[in-house]
Amino acid sequence: MATKYKIALIRHGESEYNKDNRFCGWFDADLSATGLEEAKNAGKMLKEQNYTFDIAFTSVLKRAIKTLFIVQEEMDLHWIPVIRHWRLNERHYGGLQGLNKSETAAKHGEDQVKIWRRSYDIPPPALELSDPRSATNEAKYAQYDKAVVPQCECLKDTVERVLPYWHDVIVPTIKSGKRVVISAHGNSLRALIKYLDNVSDEEIPELNVPTAIPLVYELDENMRPVKHYYLADEAQVKAAIEKVANQGKAK
Ligand SMILES: O=C(O)[C@@H](COP(=O)(O)O)OP(=O)(O)O
């Protein structure tokens, strides 16, 4: 299998909700001061390793949009087209949105929290439509049918709404020869990685994506992965992945 295309995936830098260890989902949390710094470093890593991009894709959530912009700034790539779409949004965390992950583990048990965070097809409790945390009436989704906005999602639901965007929009863009960067979220990227690497439903709970460390996928002519790697040293990536996994532990 020969590499024909290279794409970079970036989970946004630490958000205010990540900092407070709260479930975020479709809540539009901003980047924390650390997240801004992490985004800058991600741009530096890409530049130092001679990456460049012709087009960028991101979600409609500001933590991913801002991370992308900071990366563009570091790479002097302000001019490239940026396409934002809700299909790249984070997995909707339903009634867990806003709750502290450790407190939730202390209340419901770490096993339950791991099921909510990492199982493939068990959704978290749904939000009521009338819940002020529901995104249904947000201006960003006004152009869509109301049914587009979920009240909770399991990873399977996220896979089912990310993949049409991958196949219909991102793949044709890559095949046209454009160098693509995608700035998204822990679980929308897990959804894509699950598909790309054919990760089984049983193995997916152990896959965690760290904040703001660019992850490069080399793809063959059929868009199948040849290899993938983070643009940081192994110890740094390992520590960042463990940090994410441990967020569901009761303290
Ligand atoms: O929604 C959230 O809380 C986090 C992921 O949380 P976990 O699934 O890792 O708990 O999403 P992100 O910060 O990537 O947008």
Image (cartoon, rainbow, N blue to C red):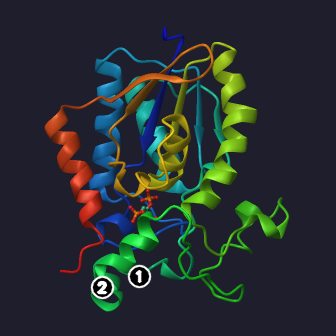
For ligand 1, which image quadrant applies? Answer: bottom left
Furthest-left residue in this view:
235
Q: Kindly report the distance in space between the C-alpha atoms of the residues bearing marks 1 and 2.
A: 8 Å
- Check disc 2 and report its element: helix, strand or loop: helix
The image quadrant that residue 99 belongs to is bottom left
The image quadrant that residue 237 belongs to is top left
Residue 184 is situated, as x and y percent measured from the top left of the image, at 51, 47
The image quadrant that residue 114 belongs to is bottom left
Q: Are marks 1 and 2 in contact (CB under 8 Å)?
A: yes
Determine if residue 30 is in view: yes
Q: Which residue is mark 2?
A: 103
Residue at 36% over, 31% down: 43
- Mark 2 vs ligand 1: CB under 8 Å? no
In the rendered image, the vertical position of residue 235 relative to residue 52, given as above or below: below
Residue at 62% over, 85% down: 132
Determine if residue 86 is in view: no
Residue at 42% over, 34% down: 71
Q: Nearer the viewer, residue 186 or 114?
A: 114
Q: Nearer the viewer, residue 167 or 71?
A: 167
Residue at 33% over, 77% down: 111
Q: Which residue is mark 1?
A: 99
